[in-house]
Image (tube, rainbow, N blue to C red):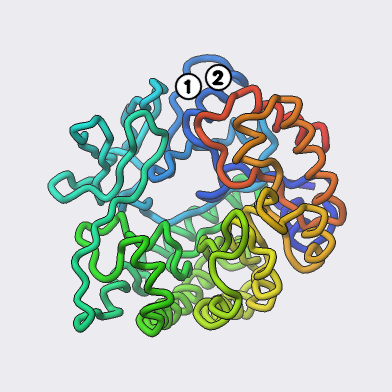
Amino acid sequence: MTSRERLQATLEHREPDRLCVDFGSTAVTGMGVCAVSRLRKALFGGDPHPKVVEPYQMLGEIDDELRRAIGVDVVGVGGRNNLFGFPNEGWKPFEMPDGTPVLVPEKFNYTKADNGDLLLHPQGDTSVPPSARMPKGGYFFDSLNRQEPIDEDKLDPADNLEEFGVLGEADPRHFKEAVDRIYEKTDYGIMMVLPGAAFGDIALVPAMWLKHPKGIRDVEEWYVSTAMRRDYVYAVFEKQCEIALKNIELLAEAVGDRVQAVFVTGTDFGTQRGLFISPEAYRDLYKPFHKAVNDKIHALTNWKTFNHSCGSVCGLIPDFIEAGFDILNPVQCSAEGMGAKELKSEFGRDMVFWGGGVDTQRTLPFGTPEEVYREVRERIEVFGPGGGYVFNAIHNVQSNVPTENILAMIRAVGESR
C-alpha cells in the first residue's frame, strides 16, 4: 500500500498492510523542535536547524526526509497563519533557551521580561502588549491573560466572535493549492485543519493572534462562563457554527475528497481522574454543534472527522460517536478508565484511535529505552488488529524527551511493521 492507501484503509477499519503512523500532521501529534533537532542529528548527522512550524508549542517541522526515515504516512495542511496571526515564512535564526539553534518565521518578534522570560506579540507587532510568555529555560509558550474588566450589562457575544468569519477567496485557494501539491506530488495521506469549528477550545479562547481581544478571554473566566453564563456561550457557539457550516461548503468545493481526515476540534473534556464536564452539560452546550458540523462534513465529503480531547473521556465516547466523530485523539491511556484493551474492545468498531502509542507523561520522558520499546509494542498489539488505529504518542513529544527514548519508540514501531 501507499501511505495514502494505508491511511484510507485504517480510517475504514480495514487492517492495512502495516501500521499507519503520524508525526507532525497536526498541532497535537508533533514533536518539540529541540527533540526534532536532536533526532535529526542522531539519524542524519550534521548540525540541523529545524523550522518551528507551530510557535505556540514550539513544534519542529517533520519534513519529507524525516518522514521517510521514521515511516510517517500522513501530512497536514493548516491555515495561512499560525496561532500568533502571522505566516510561517521568511525564516530567521533563533536560539532556544537550551541552546538549540532553530529557524523561526520572520514575524516571530519577541521582547524580554525583566526576569528573562520571552514575550511573543500578536501578528509580530511589538508595539502592542504580548499575548504569550515562554518562561526562562522553558520550551514553549503559555498564553497571557489579557482580559479586560467584564461589565455584565455590556457583555456581547459578538465580542467573542471577532476571530470568526466566512472565508474569503484567499483561504480556500490556500487550502486547495496545498492539498493539490501533496496529492499530486506525493503518496502521503492528507489531514486538513478545519478553521473555526473548535467550540471552546481553550488554546484558542485567549485569541493570541488578536492585538486587542474583546469578550471573555481569560481561561478561568471562560470555564466559569460555560456554567454561569451558559446562554452567552451558547450564543457564541450558535453564530460560530453558522459560519463554520458555510466554510465547510467552501472548503469541500475547493479540495474535494483529496483530503481524507479533518481536524475539527481540540476542546478538552477530560482530566487525569475523570470528566472535566458532566455528560449532561456536554450534551446541552457542545454536542448539538459538533453534530451539526460533522453532519455537514459527512453530507458533502468523505472526510473523517478528528476530535482531540485529553484526559479521561471514556464516559463521553458514546456521545462523540453519536455526534458523528470518526477519530479520537490523543487516547490518553494513563487517565482513569482509559485502558487500551477496554477502549479497543468497546469502541474500536466505531471509533478510529489516533494516538495512545506511548505515555508522554511518564514513560517517554522518564522511562528507559527498554520500557519505551515495550510499552509501544504492547499498545500496537492492542490497538492495531483490525485497522482503525493510527500510531502516535499521547499528545506531542516534548522537547526535553531523551533522544534514545524517541529512537526506541521509532524502533518499536518499525519492528512491529
Q: Is residue 112 above or below residue 351?
A: above
Residue 366 appears in the rendering: yes
Q: Secondary structure at mark 1?
A: loop
In the visual, does 194 lie left or right of 395? left
What is the count of numbered marks? 2
Pick the residue in front: 349 or 172.
349
Q: Which mark is residue 41?
A: 2
Name which residue lies at 39% across and 33% down.
138
Image spot of residue 16 (x, y percent): 82, 51
The reply to whether dot 2 and dot 1 touch (C-beta < 8 Å) is yes
The amino acid on which the numbered mark 2 sits, given as a three-letter code, is: Lys
343 versus 373 height, above or below: below
Q: Which residue is mark 1?
A: 48
Q: CA distance from mark 2 to mark 1?
A: 6 Å
Dot 2 lies on which element?
A: helix
Q: Is residue 1 left or right of residue 330?
A: right
**Residue nearer the viewer, 12 or 58:** 58
Q: Which mark is residue 293?
A: none
